[in-house]
Amino acid sequence: PMQTSAALDRIQPSATLAMTARAAELRAEGVDVIGLGAGEPDFDTPDFVKEAAIEAIRSGKTKYTAVDGTPELKAAIVTKFKRDNGLDYATNQVTTNVGGKHTLFNAMVATLNPGDEVIVPAPYWVSYPDVVQFCSGKPVIVQAGPEQRYKLNPEQLEAAITPKTKWLILNSPSNPTGAAYSRDELRALGEVLERHPHVWVFADDMYEHIVYDGFEFATIAQVCPSLYERTLTVNGCSKAYAMTGWRIGFAGGPPWLIKAMAKLQSQSTSNPCSIAQAAAVAALTGDQSFLKDRAAAFQKRRDLVVGRLNAMPGITCPNPEGAFYVYPAFAGLIGKTTPKGKVIDSDVAMVGYLLDEARVAAVQGEAFGLSPAMRISYATSDALLTEACNRIEEALSALR
Ligand code: PLP
């Protein structure tokens, strides 16, 4: 057969999608697995968004649109950035893509040359290093462990910057840890970046609306206006509006970069689905009050899961500010033996044990660049979460 390309061979299939698939396989075999691996809200897309899509089909919005978004959607995104983030972007400063993952892909392909460095704090969303590597860039991974609540600190940022640094990827609230940066924390990172004018910021705010305990979400271009010219502020409909299947991501940034991303898109996907774009207009401009109700529901689940996990010997689970993930670390359990005599020598072994013996699917920390730990998504019912915690507790207490 034909050889696959060097670019393809540099990347791995998404580990989170792989775990979701493995849990589905077991379920198909009749095993009652509780899936805590998936990265999507269990809520449905709001009805008013679905109605807008149906109306779009009926009224013939079923043809090609402008490559990087309809004028209506661009206007809605401009309004969103102003309303939610206090950021002024003109319509030529926003782009619409086929999901947030595509926004990342466009931005990196449009800007990276071989050897360019991208600072990626770990634990990271699985796609960052792979997309950078696909583009012949070099991910510079900086470890931010549980002792620093999974957040990059200014000293680490300063130390990671070199003349080859092109981007810092900042994701708040974070997938996989739920950690979110306060205004002060962003300002402190911004002060470092002000000293290094060649470094750009990819601010991934995908989980902006899922925050807890009155946490005030902020994004770096808003907190540090001096960085506005070299920040791509990235967001999307997937998580906030429970629209993962509709595939709408978007970003605001300087006109040249937005134009560069559109050029690439014009030769790859062309416009995102016209019907999904109409639905996104409704999502972004409609009544936003349900976002708070959904965040409140997620907060209850977070409290449940974090409380239960921290009560289990050997588990350290920082209390996250947002998103719908927790990232329990378990250095103290490495080296223990299962009732069947297997040694838990890694987080891969741990999630395998939990899948086989507790019938709970989580994702190994290795996939997110920080071990030993695992990611648990709590975007599922309280009853299933309680049952999952019971099973995990029982399985962990059987380790010797
Ligand atoms: N950014 C982060 C941090 C994510 O977790 C995800 C999805 O998992 C995305 C971006 C991309 O979302 P999508 O491509 O589904 O819009």
Image: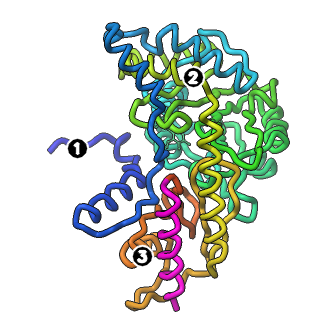
Residue 81: x and y in percent read 67, 22
In the rendered structure, which disc, 3 or 2, sits on the residue that comes first in sequence? 2
Query: Which residue is the site of mark 1?
Result: 3
Q: Amino acid at mark 3?
A: Ala
Residue 148: x and y in percent read 75, 60
Q: Amino acid at mark 2?
A: Leu
Query: Which residue is the site of mark 2?
Result: 284
| Local crowd size for mark 1, using a 10 Å CA cut-off: few (<14), some (14–19), many (≥20) | few
- Element type where label 2 sits in the image: helix
How far apart in space, not on screen, are marks 1 and 2 (Cα)? Answer: 44 Å
Q: Amino acid at mark 1?
A: Gln
Residue 116: x and y in percent read 58, 37
Between residues 149 and 217, which one lies in front from this camera angle?
A: 217
The correct choice, above or below, for 252 with respect to 166 in the image is: above
Between residues 64 and 58, which one lies in front from this camera angle?
A: 58
Q: How many marks?
A: 3
Marks 3, 1: nearer the viewer:
3
Residue 198 appears left or right of 33: right
The correct choice, above or below, for 41 with respect to 274 in the image is: below
The range drawn in magenta is: 380-400
The correct choice, above or below, for 119 with respect to 278 in the image is: below
In the rendered structure, which disc, 1 or 2, sits on the residue that comes first in sequence? 1
Query: Which residue is the site of mark 3?
Result: 358
How far apart in space, not on screen, are marks 3 and 2 (Cα)? Answer: 40 Å
Q: Is residue 398 magenta?
A: yes
At 59% from the left and 57% from the top, the residue drawn is 301
Q: Is residue 90 magenta?
A: no
